[in-house]
Image (tube, rainbow, N blue to C red):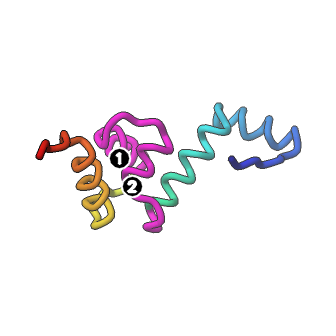
């Protein structure tokens, strides 16, 4: 959990400009984290509550952030796919 204390007048100004301030902050963190390579597509999907990678792609496109398929994305996709396979009976 992260808590940021801001003066009331600052909070009001930011909310007047951006609306839902906590959501705006989370989206900004996601965008910057992806841009600098700290966050993977899957981490952003989880952070923002998206149901699919396609929603992440749309979000990034709408914010002008080019998407690439990085090694971290491949590894996370492979891990998630492995978790979906039914266990084989011996």
Residue occupying the point 49% across, 40% down: 48
> Residue at position x 35%, y 46% from top?
61
Residue 10: x and y in percent read: 82, 43
| Label 1 to label 2: alpha-carbon separation | 6 Å
The residue labelled by disc 2 is: 65
The secondary structure that most of the magenta stretch takes on is helix
Q: Is residue 7 left or right of residue 17?
A: right
- For the residue pair 52 and 89, the one nearer the viewer reads as 89
- Does the magenta-highlighted stretch encompass residue 47? yes
**Picture quarter containing residue 23?**
top right
SS under mark 1: helix
Q: What residue is pinned by disc 1?
A: 61
Q: Looking at the picture, how far across and down is residue 7, in whole percent?
A: 88, 44
What's the magenta region? 35-63
Residue 53 shown left or right of residue 32 in the figure: left
Look at 23% across and 50% down and name the residue there.
Answer: 82
Secondary structure, mark 2, is loop
Using the image as rendered, state which of residue 63 and residue 38 is in the foreground. Answer: 38
**Vertical arrangement, residue 22 with respect to residue 38, above or below:** above
Q: Which mark is residue 34?
A: none
Mark 1: few, some, or many residues within 10 Å (few <14, many ≥20)? Answer: few
Q: Are marks 1 and 2 in contact (CB under 8 Å)?
A: yes
Residue 34 against residue 26 in the figure, above or below: below
Residue in front for this viewpoint, 24 or 87: 87
Residue in the picture at 29% in, 64% down: 70
Residues packed near mark 2 inside 10 Å, few (<14), some (14 to 19) or many (20 plus): some
Residue 50 position, x and y percent, is: 41, 36
Tell me, yes or no, whether the highlighted magenta stretch contains residue 42: yes
- The image position of residue 35, as x and y in percent, is 44, 63
78 on left or right of 30: left
Residue placed furthest toward the left = 90
């Amino acid at each position: 959990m992260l808590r940021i204390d801001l003066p009331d007048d600052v909070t009001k100004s930011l909310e007047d400009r951006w609306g839902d301030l906590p959501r705006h902050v989370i989206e900004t963190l996601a965008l910057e984290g992806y841009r600098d390579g700290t966050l993977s597509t899957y981490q952003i999907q989880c952070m923002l509550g998206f149901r699919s990678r396609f929603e992440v792609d749309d979000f990034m496109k709408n914010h002008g952030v080019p998407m690439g398929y990085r090694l971290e994305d491949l590894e996370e996709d492979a891990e998630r796919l492995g978790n979906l396979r039914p266990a084989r009976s011996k």
